[in-house]
Amino acid sequence: MDKEFASLASICSRSRSHALGFAPAQFIPPNQLDPKTMNITTAQLFDNARSHNEFAAAAIPEATLRQLYDLLKWAPTSANCSPARFIFVTTPEAKARLLPAMSPGNLEKTKQAPVSVIIGMDMAFYDKLPQLFPHADAKSWFVGNEAMIAATAFRNSSMQGAYLIMAARSLGLDCGPMSGFDAAKVDAEFWAGSSVKTNFIVNLGHGDASKLFSRSPRLSFEEACQIA
Ligand SMILES: Cc1cc2nc3c(=O)[nH]c(=O)nc-3n(C[C@H](O)[C@H](O)[C@H](O)COP(=O)(O)O)c2cc1C
């Protein structure tokens, strides 16, 4: 197994760095990862993780928000297109600009959460493909193809929003994702003059577990899955 990883790493590093002249990220075989990062549990990420409606008031340090982005940025997107853009709304002034867009049921929790992350999708994401996917002319796959641009921006920014949730949980934070808001209002207030549109919003902080609704059921394997 070690050999396999080593040879994969060496192929990746040789072909990319030689062809493109940039240093590849260091490849660490899974069995050599820092044990300090290995105590994240599946319960913390899935079974025991909830969508929170109330949060402790304590601020989340900027260093934690940077750490959050520095984790989620590594998760995959098609052609590495990385269309998501993030605004971490933390100050009362910025919250005051966001709150009028929130649906009534999402107002109080958004006001109260120490951070509300607006997850946007850059509809001109393909302009960065020469930087992000330099070994192919990937930009030309998108220019002029509006349907493919829209589907790619939405699919991949949604995935990056989901990665944000999992990264936040891995850092011991809780999330409250929301689609109940007026996207046009959020766009006008936060993304005006840019090519970014709002996808969804996630409240972030340390959730108050005593305020959770009871867990809703999920579909069984038989209901949701097939093995073909
Ligand atoms: C994309 C997305 C949008 C959501 N929108 C809202 C919302 O607008 N308001 C709300 O209270 N909850 C919203 N939720 C939370 C879901 O209702 C919640 O994740 C689901 O019921 C599962 O709850 P659990 O994670 O606590 O088990 C949203 C979740 C996701 C992933």
Image: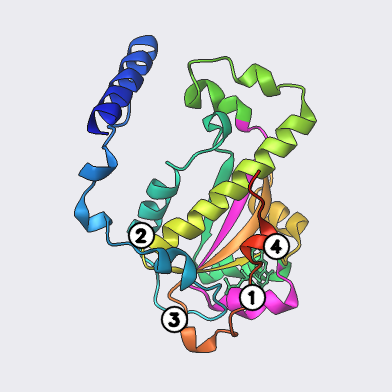
User: Does the stretch in magenta take in 200?
Assistant: no
Give the vertical position of 210 relative to 17 (above or below): below
How much space separates mark 1 and mark 2, taking CA atoms? 32 Å
- Nearer to the camera, 189 or 45: 45
Q: Which residues are magenta?
A: 102-125
Residue at disc 2, CB closer than 8 Å to ligand 1: no
Q: How dense is the environment of label 2, judged by Cα within 10 Å: few (below 14), some, or many (20 and up)?
A: few
Q: The N terminus lies in which quarter of the figure?
A: top left
Outermost residue to the bottom: 210
Q: Residue drawn 70% across and 69% down?
A: 102
Q: How dense is the environment of label 4, judged by Cα within 10 Å: few (below 14), some, or many (20 and up)?
A: few
Give the vertical position of 145 relative to 171 (above or below): above
Is residue 195 among the parts visible in the rendering?
no
Any mark on residue 217, and which? 1
In this picture, residue 23 sits left or right of residue 87? left
Q: Which residue is mark 3?
A: 56
Tell us which disc is closer to us: 2 or 4: 4
Q: Which residue is mark 2?
A: 64
Tell us which disc is closer to us: 1 or 4: 4
Q: How dense is the environment of label 1, judged by Cα within 10 Å: few (below 14), some, or many (20 and up)?
A: few
Is tag 2's residue or tag 4's residue first in the polypeptide sequence? 2
Is tag 1's residue or tag 3's residue first in the polypeptide sequence? 3
Tell us which disc is closer to us: 1 or 2: 1
User: Does the stretch in magenta take in 116?
Assistant: yes
